[in-house]
Image (tube, grey):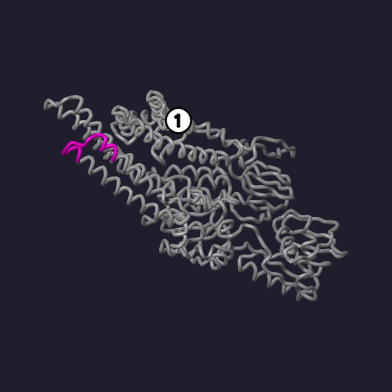
Amino acid sequence: MTTHPGTAPAAPVQAGPPQRLTARLWALPEIRWAALAVLLFAAGGIAQLAGAPAPVWWALYLACYAAGGWEPALAGLRALRERTLDVDLLMIVAAIGAAGIGQVFDGALLIVIFATSGALEAFATARTADSVRALLDLAPEQATRVEPDGSERSVPSGELRVGELIRIRPGERIGADAVVVDGTSEVDQATITGEPLPAAKAAGDEVFAGTLNGTGTLLARVHRPAGDSVIARIVALVEQASASKARTQLFIEKVEQRYSIGVVVATLALFVMPLVFGADLRSTLLRAMTFMIVASPCAIVLATMPPLLSAIALAGRHGVLVKSAVVMEKLADTNVVAFDKTGTLTEGTPRVAEIHPVGTISGEDLLRLAAAAEHPSEHPIAAAVVAAAHDRGLTLPAAADFDSAPGRGVRAAVDGRLVQVGSPILLDTVTANLEAVSQIRAAVRTAQAAGRTAVVVLVDGIPAGVLTLADRIRPAAPSTVSALTRLTNIKPVLLTGDNPGAAARLAGEGGISDVRAGLLPADKVNQVHALQTGGRRVLLVGDGVNDAPALAAADLGVAMGGHGSDLALNSADAVLVRDDLSALPAVIALSRRARRVVIANLIIAATFITVLVAWDLLGHLPLPLGVAGHEGSTVIVGLNGLRLLSNRAWRRAAGQTS
């Protein structure tokens, strides 16, 4: 396999729990060999500095060659069989040539750089593949099929056929895409739609495989085979989008073929031509090896990698995990950013935004009674109402005779009064106080038009008021949108599965004008492709399973680390570990600065190589001077790249976006 930075394919590994991370690392042969090469290189360096006999540290360096170099050597030979020449083979030849003229340290350093880069990328690729496969585990292995005679039988979900009936009990994951024929419940569909609130389900409504049933029992008819379920299509979309991406390369890799051929041809010519005219074999070989050393791309490799790796380390210290040097380089090309809504631009949990009491009851009493009734419930709306009461320092009385009805709400006895909290359907049961009913219906319409959730409260059967719930925008969202607009000259776009009213309200608060709402996972992929027209580089930020196909389809995907799904985290190219949106424009600015440092380093490295090569070709370059010039350029570009490790570099990047 090739060991170019950022392009190494990975061997498949078995999916495992997070606590088995070490075992998963060592399951990859690339990581085992790279670690061994690094250890041998370090041991050789220590032995050399300690004054050990030369055979000792030579043996350690040569063992490093073998551990880290056999895979790129094999990849280079395979490429040679296919009549192509790449830097893999050139690296091995240069390393061997360095050892042949006594510069074994130089060759070992080159081997370690390539082996380590390839190992890191192999692990990142393997984790993504595992995550895609693990997504299918969301759908339960077993489902309860209702036979024609009315009996029930547990069968593998994959055996369910279109038209068969399944029984879905409270708390179960749904085994197939189906249409409800009987029963009511609320289903958590966050894996599909990304929305935090469960959806009420009754006869005629569709339910999806892998989603979680609430407290009711449903009878549903399967209407899609397992291979065509929404969750299976999400898996397919992720795999297709990942496979359709062009092979990613660092800038320097794009010219590796011509560079490799040029160096090999020049070295052979420098060796063969003098021999044809009767030159001495030893001096000719020494000159050719000197040329190979000074022309080898050590400085060019270090010109590229240290700035990018330093930028990755700096971003990591500030809460942004960038998965590879390729990603860090590509961030600089971003010219349009798209956001998911729930959990990305918003905090992802509903909160009480407004309280509308009706009649003589106060807003504080309305919230206190509603929170007391909701306290025994585990519903997200209940959690929001109770949290709002606690935030206001209210003391909640005990609730008795608690009961909940899927799709309707809860009821309980609080302070000797019957309190009902639920959907506006509750108003259909009220026959008195029609003026209060009219006021509440008007408040419900206003809330729903703004994309908010309205919760009706009845006390002893009399309308008492409305609680309006909304997902809260992240505090950093408006400033992040402004900063990204300045960086890219294009306003960010909102892509969401939520309804247009809620999306438009949230987008207005965040300063986004381009809103594309009501999108399923496949629709988000299509929208990403539409944004990519004209050669634009799209960066998508999301957090859920439903965002994973679009994250894979975008030029770059960024996941929210706080509550992001495993699939989103592993499909993405970078992760905002602390869910801090303000770090996004800063890391893009940092990437652009890293690119400028890379270009400066390439100019320095190319200048040194050109001077040394010209000296060797046109005159007589002493080997020690050639090695000194080669190593000097390597040190200069390496130190220049390491400047990006300082916190000052992050402050400068963040300052460019403010």
Residue situated in front as seen by the camera: 78 or 648? 648
Q: Is residue 411 left or right of residue 55?
A: right
Spot occupied by residue 319 in the image (x, y as percentages of width and height): 53, 52
Residue situated in front as seen by the camera: 161 or 285? 285
Q: Residue 470 sits in which quadrant?
A: bottom right
**Farthest right residue?**
416
Q: Report whether residue 583 is seen.
A: yes
Spot occupied by residue 362 in the image (x, y as percentages of width and height): 78, 73
Q: Is residue 265 left or right of residue 106?
A: left
Q: Which residues are magenta?
A: 615-628
At a point 22% along the width and 35% down the height, the residue shown is: 622
Residue situated in front as seen by the camera: 631 or 89? 631
In the rendered view of the protein, which quadrant contains the N terminus? top left
Residue holding disc 1: 43
Majority secondary structure of the magenta segment?
helix
Spot occupied by residue 282 in the image (x, y as percentages of width and height): 20, 25
At a point 32% along the width and 31% down the height, the residue shown is: 103
Q: Is residue 348 magenta?
A: no
Q: Report whether residue 521 is seen.
A: no
Say above or below: 140 vs 374.
above
For numbered disc 1, what is the local secondary structure?
Answer: helix
Say above or below: 416 vs 49.
below
Spot occupied by residue 554 in the image (x, y as percentages of width and height): 45, 51
Neighbour tally class for label 1: few under 14, some 14-19, many 20 plus, Cα within 10 Å: some
Q: Is residue 180 left or right of residue 23?
A: right
Say above or below: 19 vs 313.
above
Residue situated in front as seen by the camera: 443 or 303? 303
- Dot 1 amino acid type: Ala
Q: Is residue 627 magenta?
A: yes
